[in-house]
Amino acid sequence: MSTRILAIDTSTENCSVALMVDNQCFVRREVAPRDHAKKILPMVDDVLKEANLQLSDLDALAFGRGPGSFTGVRICIGIAQGLAFGAELPTIPVSTLEAMAQGSFRLYGDSRVVTAIDARMSEVYWGRFVRQDDGSWLAVDEECVIPPEVLAQQIQTDTAVWRCAGTGWAAYADELAQLPLSVQAGEVLYPDAEDIVFLAKIALDKGLTVPAEEASPVYLRDQVAWKKIPGRA
């Protein structure tokens, strides 16, 4: 059966849209920190026209649910809800941190990715992910927002080699260099709709959709303590 999913993301400086039609993906992206609200809908129109589809032809609408910029995440949620309501589509929220892990795999084949987005206020949005056989990602830590120096004090030594993703590594290079982890530099800075739509396909196959009225953001500002998920290494 044909699978048709539209994904959008405006949670960081990157503004992106991806339309998956079976194994083909139509993508638009632009780093435009202050123009998301102006650019995202024309991008949606572009990919739909390129695929010769209407919103009503789709199976679901996926979105980057955060963490990220408060304004960017709110824009993404609002547009996702509006589009989904109008076309009567279910929605699929996707972690922006997990999307960056998928981006590292898509571009470089990395299967262990440590993500850190600059959250301002001397903090990072943090998460570690390990790729599973079905293409999904297992979270090693609970996603959180945390000062890098506090994270360095709390995290346990890990012998695995991790690929870095996100803007936090450059913003807090000295502080994150103190982590007891073996890390390799990466080039994925932002979440991207092309990776969100891939993860959304896995969620759709598992029936993990949310009605448009229940689509909600994840800001993480109320979750400031790092926690390792029990039983995961």
Image (tube, rainbow, N blue to C red):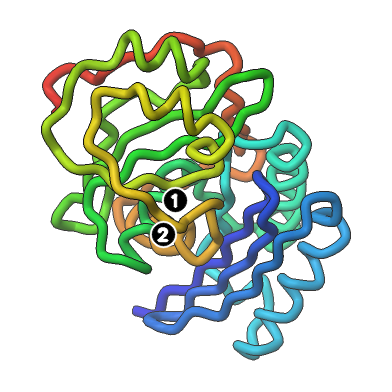
Find out whether the residues at labels 1 and 2 contact each other: C-beta distance under 8 Å: yes
Q: What's the amino acid at mark 1?
A: Met
Q: What residue sits 45% from the left and 58% below the top?
A: 187
44 with respect to 199 (left or right): right
Left or right of 33 on screen, residue 133: left
Residue at 45%, 61% in the rendered image:
195
Front-lying residue, 128 or 184: 184
Residue occupied by mark 2: 103
Q: 10 Å neighbourhood of mark 1: few (<14), some, or many (≥20)?
A: many
Question: Quadrant location of the N terminus?
Answer: bottom left
Q: Which mark is residue 153?
A: none
Q: Position of residue 210 (x, y in %)?
A: 51, 42
- Quadrant of the rendered image containing residue 14: bottom right
Q: Residue at x 78, y 36 (%)?
A: 71
Q: Nearer the viewer, residue 121 or 9?
A: 121
Residue 213, given in percent of the width and then of the height, sits at 66, 38
Q: Residues within 10 Å of mark 2 (few under 14, many from 20)?
A: many
Judged from the image, the secondary structure of the residue bearing numbered disc 1 is helix
**188 and 206: which is toward the camera:** 188
Q: Is residue 25 left or right of residue 7?
A: left
Residue that extends furthest to the front in the rendered view of this protein: 174
> Quadrant of the image for the C terminus?
top left
**Horizontal and vertical percent position of residue 144:** 46, 21
The CA span between labels 1 and 2 is 5 Å
Residue at image point 57% right, 11% down? 222
Quarter of image, res 162? top left
Q: Which residue is mark 1?
A: 100
Q: Amino acid at mark 2?
A: Gly
Helix, strand or loop at label 2? It is: helix
Identify whether 81 is placed above or below 195.
above
Residue 76 vs 197, above or below: the answer is above
